[in-house]
Structures are given as C-alpha cells and as structure tokens.
Image: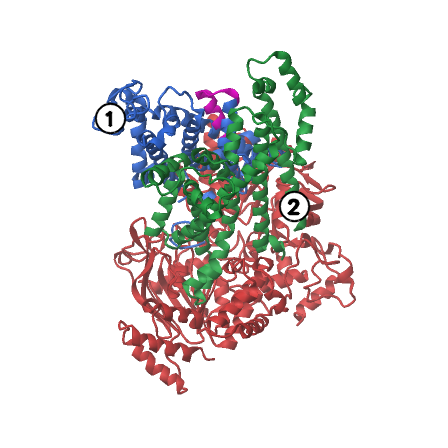
Amino acid sequence: MTGPALADGEGQAVAASSDAQPPAAAGGETTTAAAASGETITQPTLSVDSLDVSYRVRGRDRLALRNVSFQVGRTESYGLVGESGSGKSTVALALTRYLPRNGRVSGGSISINGADPMRMSGAALRDLRARTVSMVYQEPGKALNPSIRVGRQVAEVYEVAGRPRAEALERSAEMLRRVQIADPRRVMERYPHQLSGGMAQRVVIAMAIAAEPSLLILDEPTTALDATVEAEVLDLIAGLRAELNTSVLFISHNLAVIAKMCDRVGVLYAGELVEEGPASEIFSQPRHPYTVGLLRCIPRRGQRKDHGRLDSIPGFLPQPGHAMSGCVFVPRCPIAAEACRKAPPPAFPTGQDRTSRCYRHEETAELPRNTPADVELHTAPDLAGEPVITIANLSKTFVSGGESVQALRAVDLQVRRGETLGLVGESGSGKTTLARVLLGLTPPDANASVVLDGRPLEPTAAQRGREQLQAMQIVFQNPDSALNRRHTVRRLISRPLAKLAGLSGAALAERLTDLVRSVRLEERHLILRPRQLSGGLKQRVAIARAFGGGPAIVVCDEPTSALDVSVQAAILNLLADLQAKEQVTYLFISHDLGLVRYLSDRIAVLYLGRVMEVGPAERVFSGPHHPYTEALLSAVPSLDGAPGTRIRLSGEIPSAASPPSGCVFHTRCPRRLSSGICETTEPPLAEAEPGHLISCHIPIDQLTNLQDIGPVS
Amino acid sequence: MALYLLRRLGLAVITLWILSVIIFFAGQVLPGDPGRAILGPFASQSAVSALDHQLGVDRPLLTQYWSWISGAVHGDLGISYQYRAPVAPMLFSALDNSAKLALFALILIIPLGIGGGVLAALDAGGPVDRLVSLTGLSLATVPEFVSGIVVIVIFADALKVLPSQAYAGSGAPFGTQLRYLILPVIPLVFEFFGYIARMARAGTIEALESDYARTATLKGLRRGTVIFRHVLRNSLLPTITVIATQIGYLIGGLVVVEYLFNYPGVGRLIFNAATEKDFPMLEAGVLTIGVIYMVATLLADVLNTQLNPRLRTGITG
Amino acid sequence: MTDILVAPVTDATARELPSWRLVARRPGFIIGALILLFWIVCALFGSSFAPHSAYAQQLLATNQPPSSAHWFGTDQLGRDVFSRVLVGSRSILLVAPLATLLGTVLGTALGLALGYLGGAFDAIVGRLVEAVLAVPAVIVAFLFIVAVGPSAQTEILVIGFIFTPLIARTVRSAVQVESQLDYLAGARLLGEGRIRIMVTEILPNVLPTVLVEFTVRLGYAIFTVATLAFLGFGVDPATPGWGSDINANYGVIGAGYWWETLFPALAIASLVIAINLVADSIERVVAG
C-alpha cells in the first residue's frame, strides 16, 4: 500500500512551508525513514494531544472537547464511545478540519501521519483529504449527491488523485465489486435515491477506501441500517481493514458494535476522555464510574425486568459547554468525593496501556447500584384465561400512485392479559403498521377481525367510543413529535384524564399528582413546555399521557430508540413498574433484540408483513426457531461475545411492493429446502411446541437438529 | 412520466375553465348596459335595445357563456365595445408588445437574481450577503410606479438621455425599440430581482450545508468544483419553479409600467377596458393572462420533472 | 442524537414565536419600526403640526418648486406638498392593515381546513384557489373597484379577499408539515373532534408562520393600495393620499414639475421599506 509513504512525503512538504511546525515533524521524518527501511513503524497514524474544541454560541465560547488525548496506531482500530453531548462527532469534524463556522480548535494539536491539518495550507489540506483521511457518515443516502449518478461520484475520488476519466470509471467498478455489490456497472448508472440504505452505505465505503487512506474515520456508519444489513456492512469493514491495513477510528454510541469492531476504546463523556484502553478489558473490567454505569444500562443475556434489573445513571447528561470545576462526572457519580469536586482528575494508569480519569478508580469494581437488581413484580400474565386481544386475518394494503403495497398479510395473533408481547422486525416488517392499525389510526383491509375484551374493535379511532379509546393507548418513539410543543406539561397530562377518564376538578387534580409521581416527574415540571425538558423527561410525560386514561393495553413503539443509552434503562424500568402497578398489557415494538428479550414475556417475529414466529421469549431466543430469527439473532452484535457462528443473509430485504413468492423469506434463507417447496408455497403458522408457533416448511425436530449442529455455510 | 404530464395538463385545463366561468359571471355582476354604454346617455331606448339584441346580451346567461367560450377556443374573442372592432387582433398585438418588455425584463432578472443569490449564499452573513439581501429587499418592496417615476425624473427629465415613453412606434428598428424599453424595464427588474435572489440564496445555503457537499469537500475537491459541480445543480432546482410563479406578478407589474410609460401592451389594454367597461376586451384580456400563467407553471413543472432525477426516474429501492 | 452546537437548520417544525427581545435588538427592526411609528403619528396628528393646511389651495402659487416657505413645493392647485405628504399616510394606514388582517384571519382558517382535512375538500377548493391566483392581484382589485365603485370598505374587502388564498396556501403547507407529527395522532386517539384539533393543537404551532405572513402581506397591501390610487382607483380623490396625488400630478412631469410626484413617491417607498425591514427581522428570528 502506497498510503503512508505518499502521505509522509506530503507531511514533509508541509513542514517546509509552514514554519510553525513543531519538532514532532522532525521526529516524524526519522521514524518514517525507518519505515522506509523496513523497521518497525512507531509513529501512530493519528495522534491527538490535549485537544480543546470550542463553539461560539450566542456570543459565548463553549467547550465541546476538553483536553482530549489519544492515539491510533498503524492498522489499529480505535473506538470512540459516547452519548449525546459527549463530543464524539466533534472529534471527527476537527480531524478533517470541517468544523462549522462557529467552531474552532482552541487548544492542543492533531497529528495525522505527522502533519497537523489545522496548520495546513489549502492545497495540503485538500491532499490530506484526498489521499490520507476518509470519512464515512451516518446517513448514506444523504451523503451522496442526489443529482449525480453514483458511478461518477465514486470515479471522482480517482480523478482527484489524478487519474483520467476512463480509468477512474474502471477502477470504480472494481471497487464496488470489492464492497460486495454484485452488478457494479448497473449500480453505477443509478442515482442515489434508487439505492437501498445498505447499498448506499457500501457505495460510500467504496468511495472512502478508493483513496487507500491511512486513516478511515467512521461516524455511526451503521446506525441507520437494519440489523441484518448492519452485520453485513460491519463484516465488510472488518474485512477491508484486514486487507488494506488501514487505521480505523470508529465512532459510535453502540457499545456492542464497538466491542466487536475495535482493538482499543476511548470513552467520551461531556467532552472529556474519561477512560481508555484495550476494548476487551474496558468492557469486562471498567475502571471509571461512568463506564461501569453505562455497561449496567445495557441488557445482557439472562437479564429480565424482574431479575437482574438494568441499572440506571441518575441525573442528566450535561449541556454541552457547561463549565465544570472538578471531575465532569461528579453530579451523577455515586462515589464522588471532595477531591473530585476540586480539580479535574488526571489520567491515572489502570493497567497496561489503560488509563482512567478518576481519583477513585480502584473502587469502581464494587460501584453501588442506583436501582435494586431484583424486584418483585406482581404481574403474572394470565396464560390460561381469555386473550385480551385476538387478531385474525389482519391485512393492510397501501395504495400509492397506482402501486399497491401489502404492509401486513393475514396476521393472526393473540395477546394475553397482563403480558408483554414483543414485536420484532426490520424495516418493511410491518410492525409499526400493525400498531397503527390496532390503534385505529389507519383502517385494516376488509375481512379482518380484531376482538378487544370480547367485543369487536371498530376499525378507526373516529368510530370508537370512549371505552374502546380508553382501553388502548400508545407511547410513540419520538417524544419531540409526540408532544404538542405549545402545550404545558400540565395540559398534556390532564387532557387524557379529562377526555378519557372523565375526571374534572379535585378528582382530576388528585389523579394528576398521582400520575406525575408514578412517572417520577416533579410538580415543578408541570408548568414547563416540552422544549424545556430533556429527552428522558419528555418521554416520561408521554408515558404519563398514555396511562392517564387508565388503559388496558399500551402500545410502546420503540419507546427508547430516540433516547441515550443511560436514559433508556430508567424508562424501561419505569415501564416495567407501571405495568405491575396498573395491570396493563404491553405491545412492545422494537428493533433492539436485547431490549425485547429483557422486557417481553412472549415474542412475535415479523418479516415483510407476515408473522414468522411467535412464542415465549426464552423459547424464541434459545431455539429451535425460525431461520430468520436465527439469522437475526446472530447478526446483532452483543457485549456477551459472538453467540456462535454468524449466519450470513445474502441480498437485501425485498421490497414490500413485490414480495417473493411462496415463503417470503426464501430468497435469503440459508436453510431453504432443496425440494423447492419454499419457493412455491407459503408455510402455515403451525405449532412447533405448546405455545410456540413457527411458519416454516422444515419440521420442528429437523430444525432442532440443524440448529444444534450449526449454520449452513 | 407522460402520464404525470397528461394529468397536469388536465388539471390546468380544468383550472382555466373554472377561471373562465368566474370571469364571465363576474363580468355579469358589473352594472351597466352594454348597449347604453356604447351609444351614450342620449340615445333612444329602442336603439339601445336593438343594439343589445345585436350584441346578444339579452340571451340567457348560459348561452352567452357558451358562445363566448367556444368562440374563444377558436380564436374569436368577440367585438370590443370601445373600438367596434374584433378583440383578437388588438389583443394579440398588445401581447406582442408586452412580451418584448417582459422578455427583456426576464433576461435581466434571471441572471442578476440567480447570480446575486448565489454570491450572497457563498458569503452568508458577510458584507456581500448583506448588500444583496438588503438591496433586493428594499427594491422589491418599492412599488413599480415609484421607482418608475424616480427613474423618469432622473433619466428622462433631468439628464434627458432616455425617452419617457416606451413605445418606439410601429416598425421601428430593433435597436431603437430596445433603447425605448430601457427605462420601463428598470422598475420591473427592481421588483423581481430581490425575490429570485432570495430563493437562490436559500437554495444555495441549504445545498452548501448538506451532507453531500460535505462528502464532496472531504474528497479533497477544490471549493470551486464543489460549488459548480455539486452544489449549484441542486440549489437552483427550486428557483426555477419560483421563476414561473413570478410571471403572474410580472404581468401585474406590467399594468403599472405600461400605464406610466404609455406603452400599448396587455396591461394598459385591460386597464382601459376596465375603465371603459368594454367587457369583451376585458374578459378576453384577463382570460389570456390566466392562460399565460397556467402555461408558465406547466412549463416549470415539466422542467422540474426533467431536471430532478428523483422525479424523472421514480422512486425505487 | 447529535452533539453539534451549530445554529439549527431552519425547519418549519422548529419555528417558535419570536422572542421579542431578540427581534427588537436587530438594527433593521429598529429603523423600520421608527419610520413606521413616524408615519403613524403623522396619520393621527399630522394636521396639527403640518406647516400649512393640506387642503388650502393657493391658485396664485401653483407649481412652485421647493423653497423655504414650501419645503416640497406646491402642486397644481397651489397646495403645500409637504403638508399633503405628512397627512397622506392616513388613508393607506387605514386601509392596508385592516385588509391584511381580514386576509390573514380568513386565510388562516382556510389554510387550516385545507391542510388538515385534505382529501376532496382540498382538491376542489384547491382548484378554485389556483384559478383565482392565476390573475395578478392588482388586476383583480381594480376590476372589482371598477365594478362596485371606490370606497374604503370596498378596498379593504377586495384586498382582504385577494390575500386570503395567498395566505391560505402558505398556512396549508405549514399545516401539512405539522400533520406528520405524532401529537396529532395522539389527539385523535383521545377522541378529539376535528375542529378542536385544528384550533387547539395545530393553530398554536403555525402561529409563527401566520405572524410572518401578516407582516409580509402588510407590505404588499400598502403596495397595492398605493398602486390602485396611482391608477386612479383611490379611495377619495379629494383627500390627500400619496397614490392619488401622484395620479393627479403625474401629467405635469413633462413640464418639469417633478417635486409634486417625487416626494409622495419617496414617502411610499419609505413606508414600504420600513414594513419590510420589520417583517424581515421577525422572519429571521422565527426561522432561527
């Protein structure tokens, strides 16, 4: 790979032209001369030293990054983990010198292959961006120019490096093949909006590695993708990294992904790097109270809502730029001491190549919990009795511009009183459509039957009487969208009390106080408006609204997806507690299998609008299960380590407008039967064992055998 | 795509038809008896009634509407009350004159507006931006007759370099015609340059702040390349539609400018027809303006569909 | 989940009612507001501090150029142009705001209905609205005034009705953006009626848009009233009014009597610029 040598040549040129170059450049020269001679390369690809970045907001400077130092060695993969306000994206922007107009590096230095992008001239910076550093961002569709064909955009990378157009196009096709795009020429003729998310991200990755960069920066590259697609893209990145010997800086809020992809990890909190070290060590033996708390917020295998409960971190994520005199974590730390408040802690070494910015890092192994681990929850789902909802033959077809898309097809489901039914699926699975149809926000196709508490449910909300409306409510995914931002919290929570529960006057006031307390809000929040609240608080208001009318069923549509990890746990525990207290049934929709497993009693797996499998949570997770479930489970990265070998699913999720024939999963199923029945006939949803239904042509005992032996290659 | 165009055409026709109905029946509301208006207050009632009958205004309304609209579709727009001559030739020659003025204005407005807007966006928040935005805003809000008068006072009366009447006379050479049109074009340009500049500015800023502009910059491309190859083609798309909708306002501005500069265009024609209660001329004129507006927006739609890849290829995947 | 501290990208759902303190700090707003205030005071009390009467004709001193006695000169009937300009703001400042208010109220109601109810209602009424918008406002306005006769009420009604579809179109777009948010689904799930949803849920959120529309249209209203007066469709030719004064004295420009038309023209320009400075400041703050 010609990368490093070329870049160093550039670095030397810069050192000559800008006299402000520190002596490090001289050091760079000697070590890379050593590299040329074949000795061990000691200079790291990326070196960040005491970096401060501040933004000017409303006339005041606010620090977004404070005293951040880390290094990424040659061919090393370094993960930066953080939640909102941690500053992780700012790091990426600073490295490529693409800070917004009001941002600037106010201290410290950066060195990429020995050169500081902040001190470069325009031409040198362009060269750095073209050949040395590449970035991949979160939303691939938006990263591509909608008016230029994909092929041209990839070819541009080669043209910047000086190659003629024809050759650039040739190489682009090769590169697209390398990122596992099957028909590169056809894809190159397309426009970005014609590509799926996974395909678009592959194109962006192709553009990034086409330049054979020394440093590849990935900022949440798979957050917007489905689980199975994400797994493919992550595998691709890992493979490319091995082939090209590139250094990788991987930025994400998802600890499991970082654990899977990175050698070393740095944990960012409120703009400071609080802990750093080898990934395996950091995740198994964290030595900073924040890292410990964060890890406890994520459900691991075996944790359930009543057993081994998720812990939460009290308090709020600090506002960016909030000036702190001592350790930045003090307001939320269970072991904060006087010393911690006085001065920010230095980076204490906690092992080989590990540091932690905590005065009391030795005591973090037994960090006290914020919430008790085991809780008595008095709900026992009534398995014997009548189901509270019975859905039969529910289909939903959307017609748009002449095309009809069947979002749901012949869904049969039952929900038992007091249980949590988890609905799992990727995009196009129809899980959100199912929720909306049940709630009456959109009517199902004819011949569907939904029975609620023994009585048929009217298809639309407008047709339902108060009793039926009262019985079923929803907690939406995005609290910014779900709450009317012009109303006060008091009004938002009181309205359902008045409209559905029919309360007024003193009775209403009493119930309001009760409700506010049970979602752990305070009186002082009542006069505020949503934009004055944090994400977690807003979601609590939304939950209070949902419970206000005293519903029997609450649909939770990705209730924590829009929230930070440390806030998610508190909301999930709140939902579990409320379920016990108010005796409600939950329909819990999520793409996050870990959360679903934690909260649900039973699980239904959806794919392209059909129910693939439904049964008790543990049975569905441990097996035997539907091949799709099997693949989905193996695709999701987990902090518990890889669960056996990965099942790779080929191809993309088919479009719901033209679903495959027979079993809709057959196009990607690694266990497709050779008899061909999977292509022609849709399998019935049949009982594989008591209470556990699977829609697959493979008989259950054969499935058990196959899945015990191992996956098909 | 052809289907989409056909639908748009159909909608436009329907809208035009509704417009024609509104115009016709609105005209009926206007008080005044055509026969009386033509013959004057001293003619005898029988003469007036005879003329009315000849003009066909005593027929049932629907019949009158039908004969009017079917005539219009065939190019026969009736007989003017004022001039006792067919409306169509006069209207078309007036249209011809107005078209020259409007085209001249557009040729100046579009490059100035787009250029100004893009430059302002590239310097967002800086002095160039402020200059363009403020100038555009100030000039746009000043009524045409105000800027027209100022311009006449300065150039025609004080400096005496340009004529204050816009019409060069029929058969005048092209160069002379152009010279006469310089002053009237100025208020029109002032009026519309600001709005176009604003749209172009907003579109360019949005494109500059987009993710794909970031990708292009981080590829190592020069700023100029990023702007010309990546940003502009996306930022100017919405501006094109906007230009089409401004045509309507431009025609409105023509009324004032033509009046001010005594130019025999459509605007002045309609104005005179209104004050003289010449209904056939009036209705034909307003209908024509409606047609022009519809055609302009339809063209803009077609252009938009052609230039926007998302609309051209349909959304798949 | 971003942690980037940049001024937020303008986005209709992010619009909030402006913080008046932020608006009042802007230099554009201050200048505009001062000019506006000046003309309002003139409209109310102008006759008290004008140097001469705006009506008094001095037939021996017609068409006098500007001098120390008559700062803006005299017109064809010997009236003091300066005094007429001072008092002339009255008719415009009476008609324009009322017309704009009428248009805003009706336009907002229509826009709410079109945007939220959609469906057949939107399709049909939308066609009507498009048809009406095909003809420029000024033309529609003078057609009506020719038909019905000039008066303040007519002008207010006509301009108000012309603005209604324009404002409705903008409000409709804003409402459609709001309709995609979940809180409206939440309201339907409570069993709230459609009218209640439009008024208590959606309207408060589109108010910033309505406010901006009002201030922008006010500028256009003044523009239209002045233009109509200039074309001879003014409210009352005898009362001093900038547009009608220009209309009356325009003919003698050729004779070199420029001051009679220039000063009223500049007065109009100043008022319109003032309104637009204010409108622009409000819009910049609302859009973030």
Q: Quadrant of the N terminus of chain C?
A: bottom left
Give how far across and how far down residue A140 sits, in percent: 52, 60
Q: Which residue is mark 2?
A: A415
Q: Chain of mark 1?
A: C
Q: Color of chain A here?
A: red
Relative to B29, residue A263 above or below: below
Q: Nearer the viewer, mark 1 or mark 2?
A: 1
Q: Give the residue type that dot 1 points to.
A: His
Residue lying at 29% horizontally and 33% vertically, measured from the top left: C34
Task: Please name whichever residue, A67 or C61, is drawn nearer the observer in this view of the structure.
Answer: C61
Q: Give the residue type that dot 2 points to.
A: Val
Q: Color of chain B here?
A: green
Highlighted magenta segment, given as a residue range? C147-163
Q: Is residue A649 visible?
A: yes
Q: How many marks?
A: 2
Q: Quadrant of the C terminus of chain C?
A: top left
Q: Is residue A448 magenta?
A: no
Relative to C250, residue A445 above or below: below
CA–CA distance between discs 1 and 2?
A: 90 Å
Give how far across and how far down residue A80 sits, in percent: 42, 64
